[in-house]
Image (cartoon, rainbow, N blue to C red):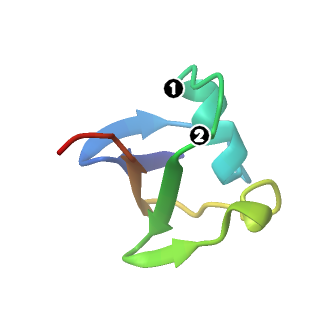
């Protein structure tokens, strides 16, 4: 199924979860990450169970340090 991650199209298997998104993007550690689906923030403890649907829009944000 097609989903959009940070405005870029990706093909994922049906019933993929947010955790699968991290695997597809080869993210080794979710530390400092936040994810939203269709403009709704999804708590980190729900990523493994949160199933995506066709054409969902996922926003992946990584916290950075700076000043």
Q: Residues within 10 Å of mark 1 (few under 14, many from 20)?
A: few
Which residue sits at x=52%, y=45%? 32
Give the left or right position of residue 17, taking residue 38 as reference: right
Q: Secondary structure at mark 1?
A: loop
Q: Residues within 10 Å of mark 2 (few under 14, many from 20)?
A: some
Give the left or right position of residue 43, taking residue 54 as reference: right
* Corner quadrant of residue 29: top right
The residue that disc 1 covers is 25
View extreme (front): residue: 67
**Tag count in the figure?**
2
Q: Is residue 10 above or below residue 26?
A: below
Numbered circle sitting on residue 12: none
x and y, in percent, of residue 27 in the image: 57, 25
x and y, in percent, of residue 35 in the image: 50, 59
> Which sits in the foreground, 44 or 56?
44
The residue that disc 2 covers is 21
Label 1 to label 2: alpha-carbon separation? 6 Å
x and y, in percent, of residue 51 in the image: 71, 62
> Which sits in the foreground, 7 or 64?
64
Q: Is residue 29 above or below residue 51?
A: above
Assess whether mark 2 and mark 1 are in contact (beta carbons under 8 angstroms).
yes
């Amino acid at each position: 199924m097609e989903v959009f991650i940070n405005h870029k199209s990706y093909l994922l298997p049906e019933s993929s979860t947010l955790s699968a998104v991290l695997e597809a993007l080869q993210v080794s550690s979710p530390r400092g990450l936040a994810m939203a689906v269709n403009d709704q923030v999804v708590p980190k403890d729900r990523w493994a169970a949160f199933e995506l649907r066709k054409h969902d829009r996922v926003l992946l944000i990584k916290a950075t340090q700076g000043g």
